Structures are given as C-alpha cells and as structure tokens.
C-alpha cells in the first residue's frame, strides 16, 4: 500500500479564482490519477498524469480548466481554474504502483466549495 | 466502454446481521479486475476487496466476501456480522488494465447504514 497525502483537505473559494491541489505519495509510482466526485455522485476520472509528459484527459475535461503537473514520480498537482459553483466537488488523487499492482489507492480527498 | 451499475442506492442492516450489495457491469473484455471500495464520511476511499476475472474462486477478506458470476457479469459484496463501522458508501469498480494506465470505472454507489 501507499501513504497518499492531499492538500488542502478542504477549501472555500470565490468564483473566478483558481485552486491548486497537491498530491504527495510516499513512494515512486508510475501513474497518478485525478478524480472528481460531485455532491452525492460517484467518482469520475478527470485525467491520468504521467511523469515527464502531458496528462491525458477524459472526455469532458480540458487542460485549460484542469491543468495538471507531474514533476516527479511522487508528486502531482491539479489546478481547478476560473472556478464556478458547478466545480464544487470532492477531488481525489489516486495512484497505481509502477510494479503494475492491480489496485488503486486514494488520497483523502479535497472538498472544494465555490461561492 | 465499460459501465458499472449499482441498483441499490441505500441499504440498511442491523448490527451482527448479514447484508449483500449488488453490482453488475458490462464489458466485452475477458481480462479485468473488479473492486469494492468503501467511503466513510471521512471521504477516504478504502479498498475492501479485489477480484481478478480469470479466477473462478470468490475473493474473501475477513467478514467481506464476493459472489463473482463472470457469465452473468455480476459482482455482489456480502458483509457478514455487520458492525457500526461498516456504515459508509460502497462503490463497485471495474478496471481494465490498458498498458501502463489502468483506469477505474465506478458505479453510482450504495449507502449502507448499520443500525443497533
């Protein structure tokens, strides 16, 4: 397993601003994933973050709105840009180990409220 | 594309009783993995149990077991001797390994309440 730390755990932001969420893992991982969980909903994959390359975005999500950085094998950030109340969600990072272990571990999530 | 369906939005069970949560999925793949995750109010997604599709034997983890029916594309979770700490949202998830990126597709979740 892995220890995955997400910061901040929660935030209340003004519309039109941006928030950057950090995800730190205690060991090197190949793939990191960012999910969104809207209120009362399931998890939806935003993008997959590779170290050293552009993130791969799922349908309905674009880089201008959700820019992602992956500077090394233990760290990634997700920015929610130009926020609106519809962006109020829980954002979770997830990791899969480079050994191809067939399971995903999650951070504790960031609860974002946009007012 | 894969889909995962959880038809029970909410379930309730008394402490020490047994409850079964349903999950069906749709895929044309032969090799894949299935998971049940638990999400308590703390928001942390916790892996409960995992099943490899190529294994006929149902996975078990202490009080948690699955009934995996590959032909029927069914993957139910049985919780025995329910405890108050089992109260949470439970998500069924499908993973198709695709090279270096193995993405999860989640169902809509079942909210389980364990009562005294």
Image (tube, coloured by chain):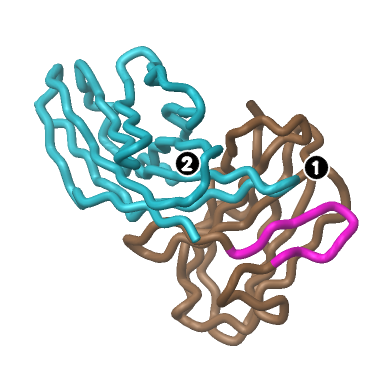
Chain colours: A brown, B cyan
The residue positioned 63% from the left and 84% from the top of the image is: A82
Picture quarter with the C terminus of chain B: top left
Per the image, the residue denoted by label 1 is A74
How many labels, in total?
2
Q: Residue furthest bottom?
A: A16
State the extent of the magenta-drawn residues as a range: A46-56
Q: Are marks 2 and 1 on the same chain?
A: no
Image side of residue A42 versus residue B52, left or right? left
Image side of residue A90 versus residue B6, left or right? right
Asked if residue B107 lies in the magenta stretch, the reply is no
Chain letter for mark 2, please: B
Q: Where is residue B46 drawn, in percent x and y? A: 46, 34
Q: Where is residue B56 drawn, in percent x and y? A: 42, 21
Q: CA distance from mark 2 to mark 1?
A: 19 Å
Q: Nearer the viewer, residue A75 or B1?
A: B1
Image side of residue B5 versus residue A17, left or right? left
Chain letter for mark 1, please: A
Q: Where is residue A32 drawn, in percent x and y? A: 70, 49
In the rendered image of this protein, does residue B1 appear above or below residue B4? below
Per the image, the residue denoted by label 2 is B44
């Amino acid at each position: 397993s892995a220890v995955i730390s997400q910061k901040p755990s929660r935030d209340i932001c003004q519309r039109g601003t941006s928030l950057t969420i950090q995800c730190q893992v205690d060991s090197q991982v190949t793939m990191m994933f960012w999910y969104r969980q809207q209120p009362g909903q399931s998890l939806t994959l935003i993008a997959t973050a590779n170290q050293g390359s552009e993130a791969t975005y799922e349908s309905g999500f674009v880089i201008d709105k959700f820019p992602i950085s992956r500077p090394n094998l233990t760290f990634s950030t997700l920015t929610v840009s130009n926020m609106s109340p519809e962006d109020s969600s829980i954002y979770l990072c997830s990791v899969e180990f480079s050994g191809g272990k067939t399971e995903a571990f999650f951070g504790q999530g960031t609860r974002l409220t946009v007012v | 594309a894969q889909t995962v369906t959880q038809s029970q939005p909410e379930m309730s069970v008394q402490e020490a009783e047994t409850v079964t949560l349903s999950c069906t999925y749709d895929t044309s793949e032969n090799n894949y993995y299935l998971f049940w995750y638990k999400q308590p109010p703390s928001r942390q997604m916790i892996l409960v149990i995992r099943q490899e599709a190529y294994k006929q034997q149902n996975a078990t983890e202490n009080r948690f077991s699955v009934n995996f029916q590959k032909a029927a594309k069914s993957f139910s979770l049985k919780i025995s001797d329910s405890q108050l700490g089992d109260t949470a949202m439970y998500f069924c998830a499908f993973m198709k390994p695709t090279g270096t990126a193995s993405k999860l597709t989640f169902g809509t979740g079942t909210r389980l309440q364990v009562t005294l």
